[in-house]
Amino acid sequence: MMNKKGLNGQWRRLDNTAKIFPVIANENMSQVFRISVTLKEQVKPEVLQQALEDILPHIRNFRVRLRKGLFWYYFEENKKIPQVQRETTYPCRYIDPHGNRKFLFRVTYYEKRINLEVFHALTDGLGAVNMLKDLTGRYLQLIHGEDDGFWRIEDEEIPREQEFSVVDSYLENYREVPRRRYSSHPAYRLEGNYLPLGTGQVLHGYVNTNELKKVCHGYGVSITKYLAAVLVWSIWQEYLDGKPWSEPVVLNLPINLRAFFASETMANFFAVTMIGHLFRNPDISFETLLGKISRQMDRKIDKKRLEESISYNVSREKKWYLRVIPLVLKSLALNLVFWMKDRAYTMTLSNIGVIKVEPDQEKEIERFHLMIGVSRRQPVKCAVCAYDQEVVITFTSVFSDSHLQRTFFDKLKEDGVRVQLEGNGPSSAKKRDMYPRVRKVLILQKGGEAKASRMVKQVGHTGGEAAREIKNYLAGERNWKDELLRRLHV
């Protein structure tokens, strides 16, 4: 990191991908995702707090706050101490960069589960997984009365090879290669009856890894290819009634670039590729669609194409005449770019693969979950992770129904994969105290917006939370300068 003249502490630039997130994020589009771990014993909050305080000095990427400069947002070192809290509301809510002690992540717990929610400008899925694994490892050490000198020594004394990398791997791997223009042709958009603002539906599907692999092996494809094809097929069946359509069904598929470019950065380092199909033939079989999806992924997910993607994104950042444009004008341009890219896909499917932990921790961890924040602009998303002998497929949605999710999981069952469902929605899925009990809310159709918003506030802002906010203000946790920044956003 670099010292910036005129500022206390240390600062660094946002990575190439992260630059857009502070511009587009708000209460209605949080750009927050969650990785969580479920233990086999109840979480002890005081131990979790100590574990977080022990590891944070050594994880530079998370020890920051977001600042607004003349030309770009940037990260500055945050010397405050984040507070672990019990989960009381819906997952993946917006993280206000002027609240939350100015951290861009939150750690919460509920029953046996530890949640790490992260603003996407900070890192991607793999970076969050590494953070959660370290937090969980330290927590389990403290629970068992074990000690590890690494977590107690001062940051300055850590050998450099033990520090977590925060380099911008986009710039490191930028090469001058022919740049490919990416299509912004509109894709089919999902529509439905919305839940009230600030609420969301979560549905987890638990499947056996070996059963899923057996089915994929029978089709001759990978798990990600199979799930992508099932999702495209389900959207076609559920929303388009299996008929020809003028707009393609397109998935936004994040790709981990570390596997292609040998990077260990904790910052963002992923690319997205569009995978989909334009349904012209109503008689197309699932097997035929799967073959088309598989060949698309083979063609698009290779190092050459990914280098083109890096070149396309970084080249604009390197142009001096674009760099000197004030942030207020860049924000307008970035919002336009995001809108054009956003309309080019139907929904997101993200698979971070298998999560592995230290052998001595395996017996104490039941499973992991990954979920992605949704909004009315991006109403449904699907996230996949695996641990031990289980794959967890999680749908997050702002729609009142779960018809698409049911069609998706029914297709898995039809192919011979058993599925156990669990969630917080109005479906018959088993809840098993998965999330805090939340008030039943009205479905938004036409009108009723004000009443629904009041209900959300009652769920998300309890008297206890309001009292804590007042206490923090009186205690000086948020001073008048912070309030000015918060309200005027200067």
Image: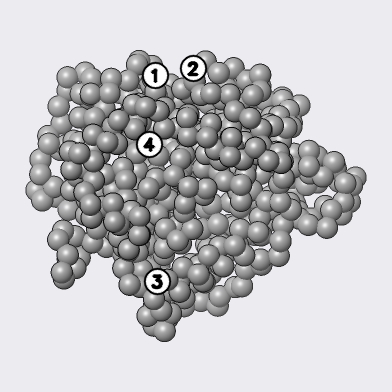
69 above or below 344? below
Task: Residue under label 3, please give it.
Answer: 327
Residue displayed at 65% across by 59% down: 343
| Dot placed on the residue nearer the N-terminal end, 1 or 3 | 1
At numbered mark 3, what does the secondary structure look like: helix, strand or loop? helix
| Dot placed on the residue nearer the N-terminal end, 4 or 3 | 4
Q: How is the image coloured?
A: one colour
Q: Disc 2 and disc 3: Cα gap in Å?
A: 45 Å
Task: Residue under label 1, please give it.
Answer: 111
Q: Amino acid at mark 3?
A: Leu
Q: Amino acid at mark 2?
A: Asp
In this view of the protein, which residue sits in the foreground, 282 or 321? 321
User: Can you tell which mark lies on residue 116?
Assistant: 4
Q: Disc 4 and disc 2: Cα gap in Å?
A: 19 Å
User: Can you tell which mark lies on residue 89?
Assistant: none
Q: Amino acid at mark 1?
A: Glu
Give the percent coordinates (x, y) of residue 269: 42, 56
Q: Taking the image as drawn, is residue 81 in sight?
A: no
* Mark 2 touches mark 1? (CB < 8 Å): yes
Q: Disc 2 and disc 1: Cα gap in Å?
A: 8 Å
Would you call the spot at circle 1 few (<14 residues within 10 Å), some (14-19), or many (20 or more)?
A: some
In this view of the protein, which residue sits in the foreground, 112 or 277? 112
239 above or below 280? above
Q: Disc 4 and disc 3: Cα gap in Å?
A: 30 Å
Quarter of the figure that contains the N terminus: bottom left
* Mark 1 touches mark 4? (CB < 8 Å): no
| Dot placed on the residue nearer the N-terminal end, 1 or 4 | 1
Would you call the spot at circle 3 few (<14 residues within 10 Å), some (14-19), or many (20 or more)?
A: some
Number of numbered labels in the structure image: 4
Q: Is residue 110 left or right of residue 452?
A: left
Q: Is residue 261 left or right of residue 187?
A: left
Give the percent coordinates (x, y) of residue 262: 39, 56
